Amino acid sequence: MTPTGKRTGESTRGASPALANSAGYLDGRLLIAMPVMGDPRFERSVIYLCAHSAEGAMGIIVNHPAGSIDFPELLQQLGIIKKGEHIKLPENAESMKVLRGGPVDTGRGFVLHSSDFYIENATLRIDDGVCLTATVDILRAIANGSGPKHAILALGYAGWAPGQLETEIQSNGWLHCDADADLIFGDDVDEKYGRALRKIGIDPGMLSNEAGHA
């Protein structure tokens, strides 16, 4: 895995979050950045963890829009559709979110999607409801209406070296919770951070931006 160089050395009061299982692997769960996150690239981030093992971790930020880039424009840039053809795109392609998935490999697209779509030798099934595909074939499928029911396109990903994510969690840099389709694929990108915190019983208004206060 490619490390991101994140800094989460500050801590907050309270016990460190318990890991999801005895092995400590959180793939298929959501990471939620604490306010003391020391790296602006990950402030108020909600990250879906696609892989987590002794070799490191990899995830996709699901709540940071990729600026002014929209999906039809990206399809044109990739030569999947011609200029003007976006008016013929299916509704889910017209409205598909393009997100900033993380600081690693930002020139590459990663599609998180529902498990009703699968490409042999290209799609990674993460759990029963979520898959990851990083080939242009899935973009073509979405453009012609044969793609997954739910999907988001992320540019880049977040990566951790072996043991790095565990250290950051123990330093209270991250909380984590069960994933659900609405938090991953929902249109209300700006609301996902607060909703993820509330999912684990935390009122966002009670969290301080200063270390030592939570």
Image (spheres, rainbow, N blue to C red):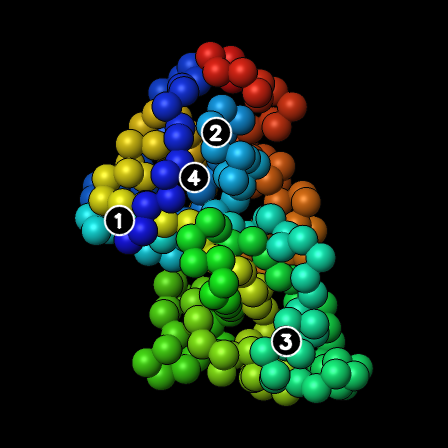
Percent position (x, y) of residue 169? 35, 32
Residue tagged 4: 176
From this view, report whether residue 45 is shown above or below residue 183: above
| Element marked by disc 4 | strand
Report the residue at 40% width, 36% height from top: 6
Task: Tell me: 193 left or right of 60.
Answer: right
Measure the C-alpha gap from mark 2 to mark 1.
Answer: 20 Å
| Element marked by disc 2 | loop
| Identity, as a three-letter code, of the amino acid under mark 2 | Met
Binning the other alpha carbons within 10 Å of mark 3 as few (below 14), some (14 to 19) or many (20 upward) gives few
Task: Tell me: 162 left or right of 88.
Answer: left
Mark 1 or 4, nearer chain start: 1
Mark 1 or 3, nearer chain start: 1
Q: Which tag is nearer the camera, tag 1 or tag 3?
A: 3
Residue tagged 1: 56
| Identity, as a three-letter code, of the amino acid under mark 1 | Gly
Residue tagged 3: 77
116, 42: nearer the viewer: 42
Measure the C-alpha gap from mark 4 to mark 3.
Answer: 36 Å
User: Which mark, residue 37?
Assistant: 2
Discs 2, 1 touching: Cβ within 8 Å: no
Percent position (x, y) of residue 146? 58, 86
Measure the C-alpha gap from mark 1 to mark 4.
Answer: 17 Å
Mark 2 or 4, nearer chain start: 2
Mark 2 or 3, nearer chain start: 2
Q: Quadrant of residue 122?
A: bottom left
